[in-house]
Image (cartoon, grey):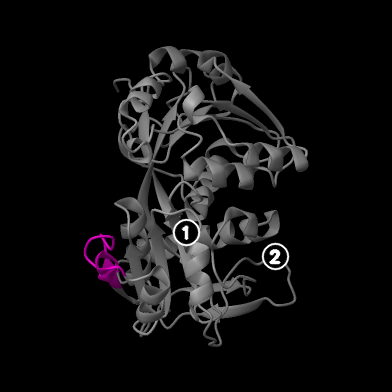
Amino acid sequence: MALAVSSSLMLSNLQAFAAAAASRVYEPTLLAYGSTADYSSPGRDVPCSHASSSFPKLSLLRKTVPLRLGCACGSPELSSVHDTGPHSFTGMKYPLEDVLEAQQFDRQLMSGIFQVAEQMEEVERNSAGGNLLRGYLMATLFYEPSTRTRLSFESAMKRLGGEVLTTENAREFSSAAKGETLEDTIRTVEGYSDIIVLRHFESGAARRAAAAARIPVINAGDGPGQHPTQALLDVYTIQREIGRLDNIKVGLVGDLANGRTVRSLAYLLAKYDGVKIYFVAPDVVKMKDDIKDYLTSRGVDWEESSDLMEVASKCDVVYQTRIQRERFGDKIDLYNKARGKYIVDKNVLSVLQKHAVILHPLPRLDEVCFSL
């Protein structure tokens, strides 16, 4: 069994002032292959290394400069763009002011983002980075713990020549501890920066922040609501590993009620043809009806199951998530009942199809349990 940490391409799609720019960073996603996979293929027999999978994370700025970056897809808005550094890219202006939810993205937009992400590997390979964002500031305002998301945004900004203002525990170490509203905090922080990346413990907080701000706001996770940039990572990783996004079967496993990553991923997968989604979760954390209703309205085939082994044998992708202790409050009995019910172990790996992969957005506890 080979285990890999997939390196991600953060698309700092900084419409940076109407320019979208991207930089490769390492926000790891746990990536594993079925036990019958051909590990002689490139990148598969390197335990705990960076695989070829990559991902874009998006950020936008409303200020306008004569820069546009994106995909060369034939749009009349396309133009050649040259960084002040050694990189040049062809692109288009993206029609987004804020990144708040997965529903903002369609297939064409995602395709363009992914193409830029591939081009941005050159930025990461060049140790000098780029200068597209020199003179601009990004504020990362995090009210919940984060390792990968915060550092990946900051890394992308710095690789493109920008600067970062950051607070990693705004719930305790900002004026929020004194009772300041989110809206007042946003109005203050926007005076110091050109874009705000926000993680918050309340669902809907990103939308509130965007309504208050005059600069772009990026949702880096809002409680049990959504995590659209993580979902872009997941879709891009699936495309890179499986080779397609149409006609795939995906099993979403674990805490589906509180997991913002699975909610955003379900919305994005609904954009593709012939997709079937399986929901495998303990009763107390089953997928909520709003996602099921959305998938039904889009004609997406979905099914709930309590048999992880059976689902794993059918899927191209098994997307495992942890049971989120922080969402249970004082209901420890319910948490203990849910935790450990569905574990990806060697038995699950043994039934996977040869090409199938296991993804985990991290952090993980014991829900993925096997030795290398």
Q: For the residue labelled by badge 1, is the local secondary structure a helix, a strand or a loop?
A: loop
> Residue 60, can we see it?
no
Which residues are the magenta region? 165-179
- Image quadrant in which you'd find residue 340: top left
Q: Does the residue at mark 1 contact the one at mark 2 (Cβ under 8 Å)?
A: no
**Closest to the observer: 338 or 25?**
338
Q: 210 or 235, which is in the foreground?
A: 210
- Per the image, the residue denoted by label 2 is 73
Q: Position of residue 7 (x, y in %)?
A: 39, 48
Please give the name of the residue rendered at 42% of the width and 30% of the height, measured from the top-left corner: 32
Residue 156, given in percent of the width and then of the height, sits at 37, 65
What percent of the width, then of the height, locates residue 41? 46, 31
User: Closer to us: mark 1 or mark 2?
Assistant: 1
Front-most of residues 59 and 85:
59
- The quadrant of the image that shows the N terminus is top left
Q: Is residue 63 magenta?
A: no
Q: Give SS at disc 2.
A: loop
Going by the numbered disc 2, the residue's amino acid type is Cys
In the image, is residue 342 above or below residue 45? above
Looking at the image, which residue sits at the far left?
A: 173
